[in-house]
């Protein structure tokens, strides 16, 4: 008879806890400003400052200026998201960091759910002396 059932047996609970932990770990980034490549790609990028300019920015290289032409990187989803964030947060770094932290937590939770689907908890339990192949049967 089991007296207590571990909440970690539920993939949903594990996903929520992992996502929350992912958010908690990176909350300290909210106090930071833009750093390194954030400066040319977000802070100094005039192409993402206006919602009217976002369609043109989506077809432009990820890195603005000459450097972007030579690298030939194209990241329209990220560029569009930065443009929408700029319109919402008006260039305040805490807003950009907050969305990134929340997205990180969400993706972490989704990875846990995916892994639970690919390898259910019952396969993770192995009795002493039992081979891994026996667990998979």
Image (tube, rainbow, N blue to C red):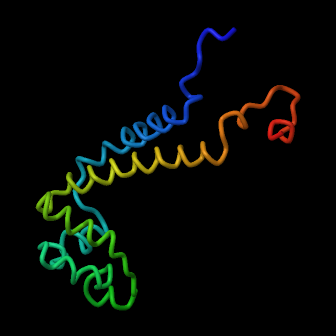
Q: Is residue 36 above or below residue 131?
A: below
Give the residue at x 25% y 87%. Answer: 65
The residue shown at (15%, 79%) is 53
Q: Quadrant of residue 73?
A: bottom left
Look at the picture and state if 127 lies above or below 3.
below
Report the residue at 27% width, 66% height from top: 81
Q: At which x and y percent is residue 112?
A: 53, 44
Relative height, residue 123 to residue 88 (above, below): above
Quadrant of res 21: top left
**Which quadrant does the C terminus fall into?**
top right
Choose top left, top right, bottom left or bottom right for residue 64: bottom left
The total number of labels drawn is 0
Q: Residue at x 49, y 38 (%)?
A: 15
Image coordinates of residue 12 in percent, x first then y, are: 49, 35
Residue 106 placement (x, y as % from top left): 40, 47
- Please state which of residues 71 and 110 is positioned toward the viewer in this rendering: 110
Q: Is residue 111 left or right of residue 55?
A: right
Horizontal relation, residue 94 to residue 17: left or right: left
The x, y position of residue 51, in whole percent, is 13, 72
Q: Quadrant of the N terminus?
A: top right
* Residue nearest the viewer, comparing 55 with 39: 55
């Amino acid at each position: 008879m089991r007296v207590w059932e571990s909440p970690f047996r539920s993939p949903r609970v594990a996903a929520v806890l992992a996502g929350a932990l992912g958010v908690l770990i990176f909350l300290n980034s909210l106090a930071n400003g833009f750093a390194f490549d954030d400066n040319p790609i977000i802070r100094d990028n005039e192409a993402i400052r206006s919602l009217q300019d976002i369609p043109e920015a989506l077809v432009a290289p990820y890195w603005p200026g000459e450097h972007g032409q030579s690298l030939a990187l194209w990241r329209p989803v990220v560029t569009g998201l930065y443009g929408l964030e700029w319109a919402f947060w008006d260039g305040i770094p805490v807003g950009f960091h907050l969305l990134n932290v929340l997205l990180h937590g969400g993706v972490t939770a989704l990875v846990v759910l995916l892994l639970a689907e690919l390898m259910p908890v019952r396969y993770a339990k192995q009795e002493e002396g039992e081979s891994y192949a026996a667990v998979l049967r």
